[in-house]
Image (cartoon, rainbow, N blue to C red):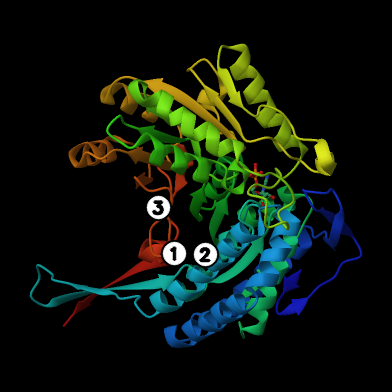
Amino acid sequence: MYINGEWINLDRRFDVNNPATGELIGQVSDGDQRHAQQAIDAADKAFLEWKQTTAYQRAAILERAHGLMLERKTELAELMTTEQGKPLKAAANEVQYAADFLKWFAEEAKRNYGQTIPSARPDQRFMVRYEPVGVVAAITPWNYPISMLTRKIAPALAAGCTVVLKPAEMTPLCALAVFEILHESGVPRGVVNLVTAANPVPIGEAFCSNSKVKKLTFTGSTMVGKNLASAAAFNLKRVSMELGGHAPFIVFDDADPMHAAKGVSLVKFLNTGQACISPNRIFVQRNIIKDFLDTLIKRVGALKVGHGMDPANHMGPLINHAALDKVDKQVVDAINQGAQLLAGGARLTEDGLDKGHFYAPTVLTDVSERMLIYREETFGPVAAVIPFDTQKQVIEMANDTHYGLAAYIYTQNLSRAMRVFEALNFGIIGINDINPTSAAAPFGGMNQSGLGREGASEGMMEYLETKLGGLSV
Ligand code: ADP
């Protein structure tokens, strides 16, 4: 752990395993509420000086962290592949994305402009400043174990906040590597703190109940996010929530079905489907579904699954056994209720894969609304294809979910693209594009997919309070 600028090693530790092999790859301090309180106290004390630093000083530290992260891209990617499972190339892409947040918010720190506002009174002047909220508690997931940290830490530090972070218990080694970079970049004592723990519950309670914590930022499942937001509400803490998704991927018959199928094959199996913006319901207009499926099945058949350290492999394991069970349950349920299995559909156990949590890239068609997969986030490598007939019908089906994170539209008709973009209740929409994300663009969900946005100037506003001055002259 890293508290008040010191590395802390406890005797009580928990195991970290490689999801591809089951091997033990490390043991990490198992912190408890006392450590969370110590870290909050350190962050609270450090805030007094940190908020007085200039944006230029904070930007310089973030720039150094950006440089160090890029220097270590290869070793960080290897660590991520070993701890989280994604293939090396995808891991390196994630490190780049993580570093982008450090750079982007180093620049944004200097653009925390206030406002002056005309008053109706001739003797009055209004001015608005945006000030850091204070101590931020952050909880991050295992699926993007480096970039989800910098997406929170970089804007928080740029704004002048201090941070206590609890990483996911499956990926604490990546978090430690990020904190080593922050330490070496010259972040002052107490400004960033890391508490690792096997059991997240008491740490979450400490974050929500301590009045020194002014803001809670969380990325993870909708259920945990709701519970944390309710607990934080009692003290009226600010909250940002990046929660689950159930992304529709809509392919109209004026799109090139081959191009759309290629897009699905690339984005659906990225990170073994373990992404909140992964397409979970693939709606294809009925008259092009055959061409679409032919291409999709061909491409899925060519995907190589195995250990992410082998550059020949396109897809790694799922994170754990529970994830395998969830995927299998949804696939079995869909088949039992009439879906057709066109590829995959089973756990992979040959050639040593039984030691990890591998599931074959799977394609289902004729998925319908009775099935679990139609309603629930899969978080696994299953492309669930649903035929549709009209634009009106597909908009209704796409919006028929309490989630609202990402959506994708494939069409060559510009007016249709615009109309459907406007009609969908989702926070991030790719139009003939499978990667509508960037450090410079606001990421976040509508409805029960979350509150607030990360990245972009909106991402820094999440860590700022508005202060109005009304001056009589
Ligand atoms: P997933 O289903 O993707 O693992 P979770 O929401 O369970 O998502 O986990 C995301 C993060 O939330 C992890 O850091 C995890 O340790 C943490 N977490 C899970 N349950 C709680 C809880 N009750 N209180 C605080 N943090 C939690």
**Can the viewer see residue 65?**
yes
Q: Nearer the viewer, residue 299 or 43?
A: 299
Disc 2: which residue: 97
Disc 1: which residue: 439
* Above/below status of 449 relative to 396: below
In the image, taking residue 282 as reference, residue 326 lies left or right, namely right
Disc 3: which residue: 436
The crowd level at tag 1 (other Cα within 10 Å; few <14, some 14-19, many 20+) is: many
Q: Nearer the viewer, residue 250 or 200?
A: 250
Place residue 420 in its image quadrant: top left
| Residue beneath the point at 78% across and 76% down | 7
| Residue beneath the point at 39% across and 57% down | 442
Residue type (three-letter) at the residue carrying disc 2: Tyr
* Residue 36 horizontal/vertical position (percent): 72, 62
Q: Earlier in the sequence, mark 2 or mark 1?
A: 2
Place residue 284 in its image quadrant: top left
Residue type (three-letter) at the residue carrying disc 1: Ala
The crowd level at tag 2 (other Cα within 10 Å; few <14, some 14-19, many 20+) is: some
